[in-house]
Image: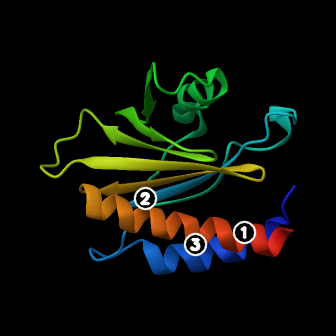
């Protein structure tokens, strides 16, 4: 398990650089405790969140979607937003919101790293997704570098 104090400090710095203003790449982010091998009752689901106020119960359908590992055949929900997976990679995937009212759309990047799932939400299309991926990759690199 990653050292929580270090991860929390990295999260705070990362959030301050990537969320909050209109020019930032992300509109919201969540860091979920996720270790399929560990008993789920020992830790809370949400380790950190910024830009959203979701409850753990709202994330259970998403976590069940992850556990089923049928990414290409199902939609998933995060809160009231419904997503369709568009791209799958070794430790992460991208999805587009299909019930958004935003003209340019919305998307989410989900990355599994150590004992966490990082969920990064962005508004826009390809260029926004690219900027969001850079931000997500930066956080994942910092966490893996500091905790290993």
Q: Residue 2 lies in what quarter of the image?
A: bottom right
Its colouring scheme is rainbow
Q: Which residue is mark 1?
A: 143
Q: Secondary structure at mark 3?
A: helix
Displayed quadrant of residue 68: top right
Label 2, residues with CA under 10 Å away: few <14, some 14-19, many ≥20: many
Q: Which residue is mark 2?
A: 28
Marks 1 and 2: in contact by CB < 8 Å? no
Residue 82 in picture, x, y percent from top left: 35, 31
Numbered disc in front, either 2 or 3 = 3
Instruction: Pick the residue in front: 103 or 70.
Output: 70
Nearest-to-viewer mark from 2 and 1: 1
Q: Is residue 44 left or right of residue 87?
A: right
User: How far apart, in angstroms, are the residues tagged by discs 2 and 3?
Assistant: 16 Å
Tell me the distance, in whole angstroms, between the alpha carbons under discs 2 and 1.
19 Å
Q: Nearer the viewer, residue 13 or 110?
A: 110
Sequence-earlier tag: 2 or 3 = 2
Residue 44: which numbered mark, if any?
A: none
Query: Mark 3 sits on what residue?
Result: 138
- Secondary structure, mark 2, is strand
């Amino acid at each position: 398990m990653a050292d929580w104090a270090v991860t929390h400090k990295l999260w705070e710095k990362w959030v301050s650089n990537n969320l909050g203003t209109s020019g930032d790449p992300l509109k919201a982010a969540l860091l979920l405790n996720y270790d399929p091998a560990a008993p789920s009752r020992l830790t809370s689901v949400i380790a950190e969140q910024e830009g959203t106020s979701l409850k753990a119960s709202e994330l259970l359908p998403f976590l069940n979607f992850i556990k089923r590992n049928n990414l290409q055949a199902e939609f998933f929900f995060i809160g009231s937003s419904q997503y369709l997976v568009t791209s799958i990679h070794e430790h992460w995937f991208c999805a587009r919101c299909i019930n958004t009212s935003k003209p340019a759309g919305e998307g989410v990047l989900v990355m599994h790293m150590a004992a966490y799932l990082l969920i990064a939400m962005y508004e826009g299309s390809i260029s926004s997704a690219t900027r969001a991926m850079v931000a997500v990759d930066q956080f994942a690199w910092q966490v893996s570098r500091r905790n290993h």
